[in-house]
Structure formats: structure tokens, C-alpha cells
Image: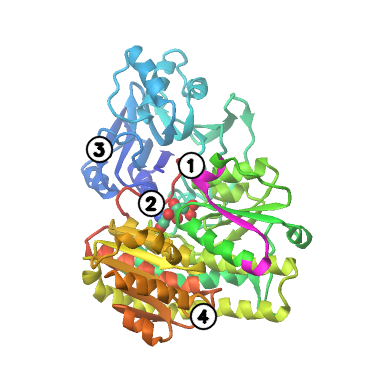
Amino acid sequence: MCGIVGYYGPKNPKEVIMTGLKALEYRGYDSAGVAILDKGVFKRVRAEGKLSNLSEKLTAEDFNGHLGIGHTRWATHGKPSERNAHPHTVGDVSLVHNGIIENYMELREELIKDGAVIESDTDSELVAHLLNRQLKKTPDLLPAVLAILPRLVGAYAIVCVNVKQPETMVAFKNGPPLILGVGSDAMYIASDVQAIVSYTKNVVYLEDGEVVEVKGTGYKVFSAKGKPTDKPVVEINWTADVASKGGFPHFMVKEIFEQPRAVAQAIQPHINLASTTVEMFELGLDQKALSEIERIFIVACGSSYYTGLVGEYMIERLARVPVECDIASEFRYRHPVLPKNSLFISISQSGETADTLAAVRLAKAAGVKVLSICNVRRSSIDREADGHLYMNAGTEVGVASTKAFSATLSLLNLFSIAMAKAKGKLTLAEEQDYVRQIQAAPAQIETVLNLDKWFKEGADQLKNFRGFLYLGRGVHYPIAMEGALKLKELAYMHAEGYAAGEMKHGPLALIDDDMAVVMLAPHDELFEKSISNMEEAKARGGQILSISTGHNKRLEEISNFYLALPEAGWFTMPLLEVVPVQLLAYHVAVSLGHDVDQPRNLAKSVTVE
Ligand code: M6R
């Protein structure tokens, strides 16, 4: 999940590479480095920690060259340290790598036997050794890369340079994303478009197994076997997403507050305002094909998986089509049966999550249509899918997903209506009623955001709990899991999301005075059952924070803290109740002094297994 940049051109490489790395810092932030060709040598500067540390080191450095590479790291092999930071330089070769070389033990042993002196603990350095060794036989970078490619097992996006070829960069990929930017007088290589969009809008998306050779301002793309390949240059109409906090102290809280707009933008393209009905045109299936779907698989990771669980509930309830929701990292290893007439839905904010992408490929290989729900257009998953639903949430910078989560929920709301319609399970009046509910959601989320003050003031008290149990039933259960995940990733506190009815099958033993129980219990058909579960927790000393709707005397008596959400049905309630659990995690993390936008050990885009 590292970010990589390569640059050839007349501008100051330091500026171009650092601009690119800044845009890619979401991919990893435990160390960073650059190598820039300067008076015939690659001058390498690396720093442990955030990109700002590298920036500081670079202020004193001057470079006169026109070629360079840069990297921001999320450690896989070897702890975060300057020694393990990229670029890795061996002899004439310097390179940056995103991914994991799975056969690194075998390569390491072989290289050591061959006399190589290995300086870091990384798998990436081994690729530099292989290339350096190969360059002694084939002194040109491109044939050297083609020669070593069969030796690499695993996932990689790599840019390499050779000190003896001052106008050349070679990049190749298998798995993680890699793009080439074509400027009028310069060439760029990067992990994503945002890294280069302020310099060029002409992009070539590289596919797995492709190798690109940049020579001066020209380039050629080859297959892994060295066969020249024609690749279209795509003109993108993106602008540089000048990431600004807009007056908020962190991106995450800004993005929490952007949720009303994110939901409105996600649903807007799919609602016919005149008839208050759903019209989804990009599903990759016509109405007949949709009506013939007999089974749906939803596959995703992390928070996206929890949205999928809500989707499973919504689709089954409205459309009566069986849905299986799976964690992407497990999906392909359980040898799933994908019957004919299935639809596979992938959910991924980034569109780059390696496990989700692998699951998409498995579904496609089985002949199943893939519908992608993602935020980043033209991301790897988006490009492979047959149908597309876009979150339209705008760039999500905070590593903890918030507005993409809500945008996805709202798309699943609409998809479940579309599916139910295709199956003849909804009357027009029912459809219109559901559409009105989702149309009302942005304004209701605005109201829920008023709870921000409560969490800000309560955070100092909340942070003293030993742990948090988040409980919910039905559609609220995935939100309980999302709440626990948010607290874990931001506050580094132990938290679990449980189906409230499961408490007596074990987790009740955890409850005492130091345990906070966050109960998601809006007034719906499961409300009375949820109250019973709260009584059980209360009787064991649990400190209860209830998130409900309206007022209920008994519930308020049991609860140590009671928060009321606006009235809404089960269909849109997840959109409302996720906001307080986001605010809880955010404020507790801030109060603990954590870096909420870049929590430790995590990265925004997970492009390795
Ligand atoms: O980009 P994706 O939606 O595929 O990412 C999936 C997860 O990595 C992501 O949701 C992760 O769990 C978030 N950090 C949660 O806040």
C-alpha cells in the first residue's frame, strides 16, 4: 500500500516528486524517500516517519537533475526505519516498490549465496539486487526487467532507474495500481492519478503484466514477454483535489460533516424526481437480466464489508433474493459456489483493495456479472466491473472511512429498491415511500451531527473505559461492528461489535463497571428485545450509552447516557446511527492525542493481501 512516483522532465524533480508523494501519503506514512539523478549519481534522501520528516530533510538539499523516483511506505517486510525506506539502491539501480514479493526468502538465499550484501529487511531491495545482477549481462534496463520478471512472485508496482541511463525509467506491475502520465515535455509514473494531475491530464492505465519504458519524453508499453502493446492515452477531466480541511481540525471530522452532501450526491443520479422512483442505468444488466438474478454475492473488506452486511439485509427484505455477504480476504479461499444467474457486487471506496479485486476476478472467471460500488472512478476494480455505482463522495482523505460509508449505504438503499422492482416485489406507492425516506436522510444526518458537541464534551470521560461493546440487532448489528472498528482504528482501544442477542452466549462475561456498552436500539420491531439485552448488561454493571429514537422511560432509566436520533424507519436508520459512533471514535481519539487522519499501522488503500 505504498505510494510510488517517477519523474522525467525539465521541472525540479524534487518539487514534482514531493507533490506526488503528498497526494499519495494516504497509501502509507511510516517512512519516505527520494532518489534524484544529480550530476551523474543518484542522490538518495530517506526519512523515517511521516512525509513531513522527509520534507524537512530535503529543504537543505539542492538537486540539478531531471530524473527521479520517490516513495511513501507502509511497512510489510521490515519495520519502519530509514534503513528499510525506499528507494533501494544496489549498484547502478535504484527502485521504488509497492506490494509484496512472496518468494523473497528464496530470492534472498539465492542472492546471498551469490555474494550480495543485503542492507535492509525488505523484499523490495532483493528486486534491486536481481536487476543489478542482470544489468551486468544485459546493460539496458528494459531487457534486464524483462529477464527478471519471471523470478518475481507476488504483487508489485515498481519504478526503476539506472544511473547509466539518465533519460530512462522502467515501470512494471502485477496487482497494485500504476499509471503513466504523458506531459508535453515530461513523463510521470505514479500509483494514482491524483499524484500527477496538477501536471498532466493525459494518462495511460497500466495493466498487470505490462512494462513501460520511458525514454526522454517518449514511452513504449510492452507485455511481460517484451511484445509491444498499444495502449490508449485517456484524457481525464479531474482537477487536483486540493485537500483542505476547510476550517476543521482534521480531515476525518470534515468528512463526517460532509455526509449529508455525500449521500445527496450518491443518490441524485438515480432518482427520478418527477415520479419519485429509482432509475439505475449503469448496473451492467438490463431490466430482464436483473429480474432473472437468483442470488447475490456482496464482497468487500473492513468498513465496506459492514455496508455490505446492511445491504444483505435490505436486499433480502425488499427483493427476497438470497444474498451472501463475504469478507473479500476469505472469499476466494473458501472455494465459493457461484451459480448461474448470480450477481456479484464489490464494494470498495478506493477501488484498489487487493482482496476485493481478487474476488472480482474470481467472479468474472466464473462468468458472473460484476457490479462495482466504488468512489474512485477508473480505479482497478471499477475498470474490471460490468456495472458501476459511484459513491460520488469526493476524495476521502481520512484513513477511517466515513462519508464513503454513508454514500455506499444510500446506494444500497436504492439498489435494493431497484432489485425489488425488477422482481415485482414493490408497488409504486411502496417504492415512492422508500425513495422519500432516502431523500429525507441528508437533512436528518444534519440533525444528528448536532451530537458532535456532546461527544466532544464527553470524550474525556469516555476514554477512561477499559473497553467498549457495541450492540445491535438486525440492520443495526453491522453498524455496531462499524462503531467498534472505528474505535479500534482511531483510539487503539479494545472494542467489539456484537449481535445483541449473542451476549448471553459468552460476551456477558466481559461486562463490569469499566465496560462501556453502546446500544444501538432505535424504536423498531426489535426494540423490546434490545431493551431486554440492555437490562442484562446493566444487571452486570455495564455502563450503557443508548442510541435510540424519541423517548422511552425504561430505556432512559437503564442508560447512563441516552442520545435520541430523528425518527426514521429501519431502511435509513443505519445512515443516522453510524454518525454518533463515528463521532465517538473521533473525539475519544482526539482526546487521547492520536493522529486521527493517519492512525498508526494503517493505510487508506490496501493493495496487498
Ligand atoms: O477502499 P476499500 O473500501 O476497499 O477499503 C476497505 C477497508 O480497508 C476500509 O474500509 C477500512 O476498513 C477503513 N480504514 C475503515 O475505516
Q: Alpha-carbon neighbours of circle 4 within 10 Å: few (<14), some, or many (≥20)?
A: many
Q: Position of residue 464 (x, y in %)?
A: 21, 65
| Residue with the mark numbered 3 | 81
Q: Are marks 2 and 1 in contact (CB under 8 Å)?
A: no
Quadrant of the rendered image containing residue 210: top right
Label 1 belongs to which residue?
Answer: 185
Q: Which residue is mark 2?
A: 26
Q: Is residue 279 visible?
A: yes
Query: Marks 2 and 1, Cα distance to the nearest angstrom?
Result: 28 Å
Badge nearest the viewer, 1 or 3 = 3
Q: Are the two marked residues, 4 and 3, in contact with CB atoms closer than 8 angstroms?
A: no
Up the image or down, 565 lies above or below 28; here it is below
Q: Determine crowd level at label 3: few under 14, some 14-19, many 20+ residues with C-alpha closer than 10 A.
A: some
Q: Is residue 321 magenta?
A: yes
Q: Which residues are magenta?
A: 317-332
**Residue appearing at x 23%, y 40% in the figure:** 61
